[in-house]
Image: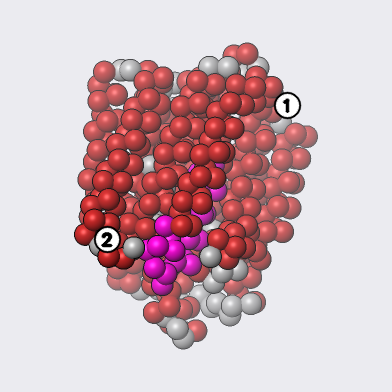
Amino acid sequence: MIKKNLQQLSSRMLIMLYHQLAVIITLPWLALKLSPSVFGLVSTALILIQTGWVLIDWGLINYSTEIWKRNSSLAKRNSLITNLIASRQLLSIIYLIFILILIGLGVIILPWQFLLPFVLSTFVGAIFPLWFFHVNRSTKELLSITLISRLIFVCLVMLMVRDDSDVITYLYLHSLSFLVITFYSFYRMRVKYFFYWQGFSINKVNLHIKKSTAFFINSLTNSHVHIIWSFAVTITQGPIIIGLYSIAEQGYRAGSAVSNSVAEVLRLNSKDLSILKIWRVTFFYMASYFFVGCISFIFADTIVRLFFEPEYYGSIYILKILIGVWLIQSYIKLLNYPLLGKLITISKLHEMSSYILIAHLIIIALWFYFKGGIDWFTLSFFSASLIQLSLLIIRIKHQLNLKKNIF
């Protein structure tokens, strides 16, 4: 089971890591070449772009995993794919309008010249059909194009970004890099999987959004809850503070890309397995995460001091807190669909997600009300995640007591 997961995980995980590492590698260069305030503006744009990808995806990875086999014929699958893509396009429009309103009201500080590359990056990244290759267990087909595109992106950034006047160039390069990968993905869907765009139905589009809402809330609270906290930073802090937070947060996202992939592949391969087998695999990954978390915490200070100037050393404390958050959130992901979803059914698991989301929002509201600052912000994030993990463990323990005859 573990070997099978790792074989499928390697390509999925590498794709996510290529994307995240491309951003992480270019951050020190941007911090060196740009002034702290401009670096903060770029960080704001990146946070909003990555937040949009998660919100617009709307839990599609998990949702498509559950419904894919119900559409066995090519015609039905083409109709399903068309309507799912159309639903992402609709959500993209809604999200972008919402962000533009916040920028117009001055809630989010982002220059209007950032608008076009921001919109382009958000849209092409959001409709990137990784979910399609995930459910077909063929993500390895995207490895080469992803690696090549992101390497070219990193090289061009090093060559073309020299000072504050080149900041828009960076955002356009980011957009074009994703544009190449997304176009190639649809090309592969067309020539290998015979996907043809069909007329979509607005009713079906809305139905898919409605049906995937529970999956989205669960995905948001268990795999992507950091975007809520990151978005809170963009609407409450200035560019310089956002820049400090972004350095630590991008490191968190890299680790989260790995743990998200592990949980999603584990769910894909464990739907028909016993609780005992799932638990064994879960324990293996939990032990691995703990080791990685300890190593990352020890070397966090050294890494930041090695790649960033002294004015960015304030991100070290934030990074260490977020490493702890990553470890807790990684455990939550492993206990979520693969294990607890098996014990109490997915529908009941989704019922828990709404309460967890409300708890996170309440803690964010308390932080904002008491104006605790960025340090208290990350500590609040850590506490909220710890509470969530505790609730899941209590629920699992209760269910195992009810089903102790399984073991």
Residue drawn at the location 26% of the way across and 18% of the way down: 370
Give the residue type at disc 2.
Lys
Give the residue type at disc 1.
Arg
- Give the image location of residue 74, x and y in percent: 49, 84
What residue span does the magenta drawing correspond to?
255-279
- Give the image location of residue 220, x and y in percent: 36, 48
275 lies left or right of 24 = left
Which of the 4 image quadrants contains residue 233?
top left
Q: Nearer the viewer, residue 140 or 236?
A: 140
358 lies left or right of 234 = left
Query: What secondary structure is marked by label 2?
Result: helix
- Give the image location of residue 172, x and y in percent: 63, 42
Q: Earlier in the sequence, mark 1 or mark 2?
A: 1
Count of number-bearing discs: 2
Q: Residues within 10 Å of mark 2 (few under 14, many from 20)?
A: few
Residue corresponding to mark 2: 404
Distance of mark 1 from mark 2, alpha carbons? Answer: 63 Å
Q: Residues within 10 Å of mark 1 (few under 14, many from 20)?
A: some
Position of 9 relative to 166 (above/below): below
Residue drawn at the location 41% of the way across and 72% of the way down: 272
Asked whether residue 275 is in view, the answer is yes
Residue 206 among those drawn in magenta: no
Q: Which mark is residue 162?
A: 1
Residue 263 among those drawn in magenta: yes
